Image (cartoon, rainbow, N blue to C red):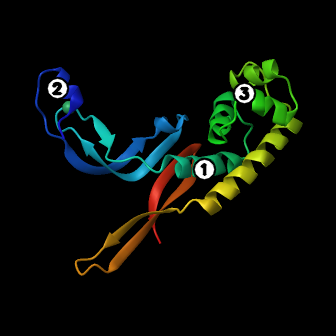
């Protein structure tokens, strides 16, 4: 694949395969990274892009689990991420929590903080959703076969949190 960045400067530069850490902003949170992930890097401008993105629904459920396990107070962006994961509108979320929509909008915009009791309620609803989804989704993401066709390795998507960063990676199982 040719580097898009270099192409804009009028260079034709082929990208090289790499295994690296990539930001996974596509998920909606800024602190999520794809770890030991296959990708391409440009030898000229160092632009790097992951070769593939994880199953978005599964990755989001794993990320949501990390967010919940961290035990930290949810910020507006995390609440937005969790609401989207559950495919709820702001009005539906506000009504589930029994709060008004204006207040809920302020919370997502970080202009107000969710009351402790509402946060517990929200985390309970999300935990239920995440557990059900993780049980339902077939999380075997990739199978690697040997030359005779026998199964050599099965990879599952996994996640962990380190220093406030959430990592998504492929784990051999
Ligand atoms: Zn480049």
Residue 156, image x and y in percent? 48, 63
* x 78%, y 25%: residue: 104
Crowd rating for badge 3 (residues with CA inside 10 Å; few <14, some 14–19, many 20+): some
User: Reading the chain from its start, which is encountered first: label 1 or label 2?
Assistant: 2
Residue identifier under label 1: 61
Q: In the rendering, which numbered label is found on residue 90?
A: 3
Q: CA distance from mark 1 to mark 2?
A: 36 Å
On screen, residue 45 versus residue 104, left or right, reads left
Quarter of the figure with the N terminus: top left
Quarter of the figure with residue 4:
top left
Q: Does dot 1 land on a helix, a strand or a loop? A: helix
How many numbered tags mark residues here? Answer: 3
Residue 62, image x and y in percent? 59, 52
Crowd rating for badge 1 (residues with CA inside 10 Å; few <14, some 14–19, many 20+): many
Q: Does dot 3 land on a helix, a strand or a loop? A: helix
Residue identifier under label 2: 7
Query: Which quarter holds ligand 1?
Result: top left
On screen, residue 164 versus residue 108, left or right, reads left
Q: Are marks 3 and 2 in contact (CB under 8 Å)?
A: no
Residue 55, image x and y in percent? 47, 51
Residue 91, image x and y in percent? 76, 27
Q: Are marks 3 and 1 in contact (CB under 8 Å)?
A: no
């Amino acid at each position: 694949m040719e580097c898009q960045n270099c192409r804009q400067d009028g260079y034709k530069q082929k990208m090289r395969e790499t295994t690296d850490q990539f930001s996974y902003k596509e998920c909606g949170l800024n602190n999520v990274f794809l770890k030991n992930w296959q990708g391409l890097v440009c030898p000229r401008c160092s632009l790097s892009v992951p070769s593939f993105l994880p199953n978005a629904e599964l990755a989001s459920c794993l990320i949501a689990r990390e967010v919940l396990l961290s035990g930290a107070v949810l910020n507006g962006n995390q609440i937005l991420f969790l609401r989207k994961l559950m495919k709820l509108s702001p009005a539906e979320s506000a009504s589930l929590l029994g709060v008004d929509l204006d207040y809920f909008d302020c919370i997502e915009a970080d202009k107000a903080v969710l009351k402790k009791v509402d946060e517990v309620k929200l985390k309970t609803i999300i935990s239920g959703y995440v557990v059900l989804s993780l049980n339902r989704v077939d999380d075997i993401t990739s199978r690697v076969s040997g030359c005779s066709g026998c199964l050599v390795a099965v990879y599952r998507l996994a996640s962990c949190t380190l220093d406030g960063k959430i990592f998504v990676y492929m784990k051999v199982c």
